[in-house]
Image (tube, helix red, strand yellow):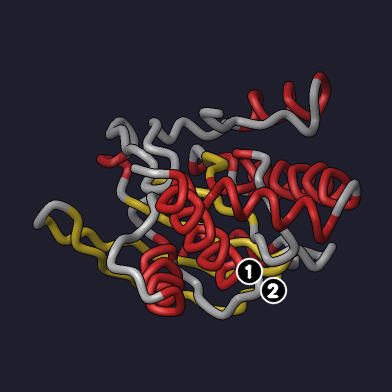
Amino acid sequence: MNINSLSLRKKVAREAANLLYFRAEKEYKQAKQKAAKIFGVHFLPANFEVAIELENIADENEGKARIEHLIQMRKEALKLMQILKAYNPLLIGSVWRGTIHHESDIDIVVYHDEPYGVVKALKQNNLQILQAEWVTVTKKGKRKASFHIHAESLAREKAEIKVISPEEASRKENCEIYGDEITGLRIKELEKVLKENPSQRFVPF
């Protein structure tokens, strides 16, 4: 690939990242397709390339406040996980990674067969439930259903809690953006991070 091609590829990745950052698109695939159309090219950058550009844009726009917000979101995530302790919660997404930006929310996975029990626990702890619904996705030809709860903490941080079957707890999944295994953080691991290195990043670069 020549220098001009590399430069154009970077521009497409940057445009896709812009679309995601400013919420013109919500998904990487659609953002990349729109960016490619804007530049009139027939290739798509990798999700990893877009993620790097998204990091750059977030740093440029948010500066040091981004780190402060990350720490605040991790503290809020810990409070949520303690509420959901009985359901073996796992922090994933950008708050785990340390790659949050101004539109990020807290992503937590819990393992339970009765999702409305999780909703009840959140309500009892004064969290506002914004939306709760079943979501079905198809991966590698297999359909999987999970229950998604969108909530807001007392500190007005948005959170998405995904409730999946306990049978899925031991199954490993690779990240569609970075390509590595999604390990996330359990309660004790998050407590350790907040104590020792609250802005620690968990990314493969």
Check if mark 1's residue and mark 2's residue have beta carbons within 8 Å: yes
User: In the figure, is residue 184 to the left or right of 127?
Assistant: left
Taking the spot 54% from the left edge, 50% from the top edge, the residue there is 51
In percent of width and height, residue 26 lies at 50, 72
Callout 2: helix, strand or loop? strand
Using a 10 Å C-alpha cutoff, classify the residue at mark 1 as few (fewer than 14 neighbours), some (14 to 19) or many (20 or more). many
| Nearest to the observer: residue 102 or residue 48 | 48
Residue located beneath label 2 in the image: 128
Taking the spot 48% from the left edge, 75% from the top edge, the residue there is 132
Q: Does residue 127 sit above or below 65 in this rendering?
A: below
User: In the figure, is residue 22 to the left or right of 167?
Assistant: right
Taking the spot 52% from the left edge, 39% from the top edge, the residue there is 90
User: In the figure, is residue 106 to the left or right of 6?
Assistant: right
Q: Quadrant of residue 41?
A: bottom left
> What is the number of the mark on residue 126?
none
Q: Is residue 57 visible?
A: yes
> What is the number of the mark on residue 151?
1
